[in-house]
Image (tube, rainbow, N blue to C red):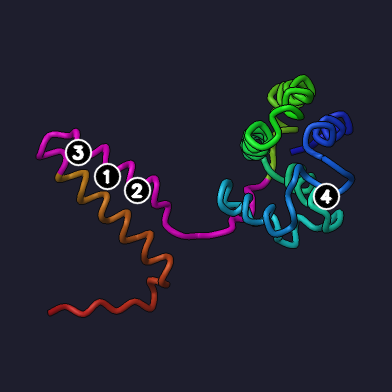
Amino acid sequence: MKLKIQDLRLFNLVFESDPGWILDFSNRTLSAFFDEELNIDIDDECYKEEGTSKAKRVRCLLKQVDRETALRVLDTLWRYKMETMPEQAEQSRNDWLALISRLKNTDADTAKGDRPVQAWHGVDWPSLIAEMNEMKSLSPHPRGFRFEAWLAELFRALLQIVGGDKLIIPFC
């Protein structure tokens, strides 16, 4: 996403606690936060082009990704700030709203960007479990067909993890 100087200034006002720092994160906790909450590898080399500080890596990420991802990252950081620093969040609320408004109202060309580097490439267990729970409400016949498709989806996901081209399944 093409961020303008004003966008970066608002980002700094909302999220940079000290120069180079994002909220109260250490390098380790920022990495864990992006991994667990967003499935983004913030430590990837492509996000260190402007430097290795936490703020520079996050700004670099925001400049490279598409608008949808940038908004998701900013929303997740904002929710964290509201939970951990409610007084500071209230003080920066207007800057936050201005930043989000600016990003949502950009043209299609400005909103373009790459997909972020994923921290893990595993099975999306919460989605699979939610889908399985949704099947419970189906009548028996459609539930059986949907369960068959669900199992195939699960199997494909597991094959990607273990390297399906090398997997040998013995039949008894």
Q: In 3D space, how far apart are the residues under numbered discs 1 and 4 (Cα atoms)?
A: 41 Å
Q: Earlier in the sequence, mark 2 or mark 4?
A: 4
- Labelled pair 1, 3 in contact (Cβ < 8 Å): yes
Residue ID at (42%, 57%): 123
Residue ID at (78%, 23%): 91
Q: In 3D space, how far apart are the residues under numbered discs 3 and 2 (Cα atoms)?
A: 13 Å
Label 2 neighbourhood size at 10 Å, few (<14), some (14-19), many (20+)? some
Q: In 3D space, how far apart are the residues under numbered discs 1 and 3 (Cα atoms)?
A: 7 Å
Please give the range of residues in magenta. 114-143
Identify residue type, mark 4. Answer: Lys
Name the secondary structure under disc 1: helix
Name the secondary structure under disc 4: helix
Q: With 49 as the anchor, is 139 left or right in this view? A: left
Q: Magenta segment: does it hold 140?
A: yes
Residue ID at (66%, 37%): 84
Identify residue type, mark 3. Answer: Lys
Identify residue type, mark 2. Answer: Leu
- Labelled pair 2, 1 in contact (Cβ < 8 Å): yes
Q: Earlier in the sequence, mark 1 or mark 4?
A: 4
Q: Earlier in the sequence, mark 3 or mark 4?
A: 4
- Labelled pair 2, 4 in contact (Cβ < 8 Å): no
Would you name the residue on which mark 3 appears? 136
Viewer-closest of 137 and 18:
18
Quarter occupied by the C terminus: bottom left
Viewer-closest of 126 and 17:
17
Q: Magenta segment: does it hold 51?
A: no
Q: With 107 as the anchor, is 55 left or right in this view? A: right
Q: With 72 as the anchor, is 8 left or right in this view? A: right
Residue ID at (83%, 54%): 53
Q: In 3D space, how far apart are the residues under numbered discs 2 and 4 (Cα atoms)?
A: 35 Å
Would you name the residue on which mark 1 appears? 132
Would you name the residue on which mark 4 appears? 56
